[in-house]
Amino acid sequence: MRRKGDVLLPCLLFAYREVPQRGVGFSPFELLYGYPVRGPLSIVKEGLERAPKAPPQDVVSYMLALRNQMTRFWKEAQSILKANQEVMKRWYDQKATLVEFQPGDKVWVMEPVEPRALQDRWSGPFEVKKRKGEATYPVDLQTPRNPLKVLHVNRLKAHFERSEVNMLLVTDEGMEEESEPLPDLLSAQEGDGSVKGVILSDSLTLNQKGDCYELLEQFSPLFSLTPGLTHLCVHYIDTGDSLPVKSKIYTLSDKVKASIKEEVSKMLALRVIEKSSSPWASPVVLVLKATAPVRSQNSDSVWTTGVSTQSPGLMLTHPPS
């Protein structure tokens, strides 16, 4: 086939041009010459059917009939082509959305890359001057020769201004932080947790205030400022088949090491934490306050004193039966 390509190519083109096209309803030969070309299959068909031959015509009558026939072919082909285009447009517009731009809007323009026609690039943003048609807009491309260019909406993409984003700032120990202060729960262990300083509303009578103070004294352990424990609520963390993810050890300054040891000792004494040999662990967060000493919290963060392990796939489950 490769060696006879130049010989078979005319035969292939002839077979293609004698077949009616779906888009126009006629073959290319019929639209070009005004009559179907007799190919090999047509000759075989005529021999099998043995149809009677048409009577001879003079040249003038033949040319007039051929001209009328070609005019009819062209009109029918145009009507069929228009109907097929409307069907294709309905299918194409099923998921299409109307895109409109106003004068002054910023847009990006799609420009084909010359070395590779199938690759596109977006340049801009440029300003839309006005609306010229239903889907065309003159755009200021800021070129010296032809600054305004009429472009179709399919080659335009809206430009959105980037909003200002406040990034996270890492400050030194001596700089003042403007973050919201965290509740200092551990410093409350210095107080006695008394409810005598509770101020009640003046709208209460003396008897009502006495009843409130009596209830507060009766349940004063519940109002203690020192963190405690409860056995009423227990949850388990199911690690599943996940393996501990190990990270590097973060370095600590000598100034915060003593504070960490002190805070860990206090939390161990309060029984809010306990020693564990599990490979799963939670790093330690160091929060530097402007009006309070350094406090530590058990959470996922950046400053750790050992090998930290984290897993985003942990799941809280009910206590096992």
Image (tube, rainbow, N blue to C red):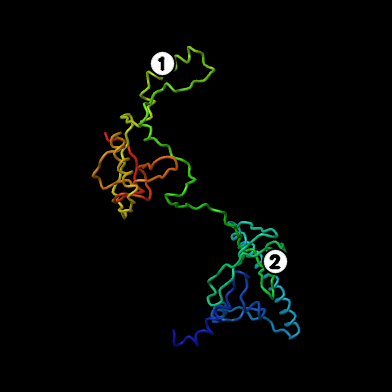
Q: Secondary structure at mark 1?
A: helix
Name the residue that disc number 2 marks: 138
Mark 2, other Cα within 10 Å: few <14 / some 14–19 / many ≥20: some
The residue sitting at 66% across, 73% down in the picture is 143
Where residue 121 appears, as percent x and y from the top left, is 55, 69
Whether residue 182 is situated above or below residue 127 in the rendered picture = above
In this view of the protein, which residue sits in the foreground, 115 or 13? 115
Q: Which of the 4 image quadrants contains residue 150?
A: bottom right
Q: Would you say 256 lies left or right of 99 here?
A: left
Where residue 51 appears, as percent x and y from the top left, is 60, 78
Q: Would you say 296 lies left or right of 56 here?
A: left
Where residue 203 appears, as percent x and y from the top left, is 54, 17
Q: Secondary structure at mark 2?
A: strand
In this view of the protein, which residue sits in the foreground, 243 or 307? 307
Name the residue that disc number 1 marks: 214
Q: Which mark is residue 320?
A: none
Whether residue 138 is situated above or below residue 37 in the rendered picture = above
Q: Residue furthest left?
A: 277
Q: Quadrant of the N terminus?
A: bottom left
User: Which amino acid type corresponds to the residue marked 1 in the rendered image?
Assistant: Glu
- Structural distance between the alpha carbons of marks 2 and 1: 81 Å
Of the residues tagged 2 and 1, which is closer to the observer?
1
User: Which amino acid type corresponds to the residue marked 2 in the rendered image?
Assistant: Pro
Which circle's residue, 2 or 1, is located before the other in the chain? 2
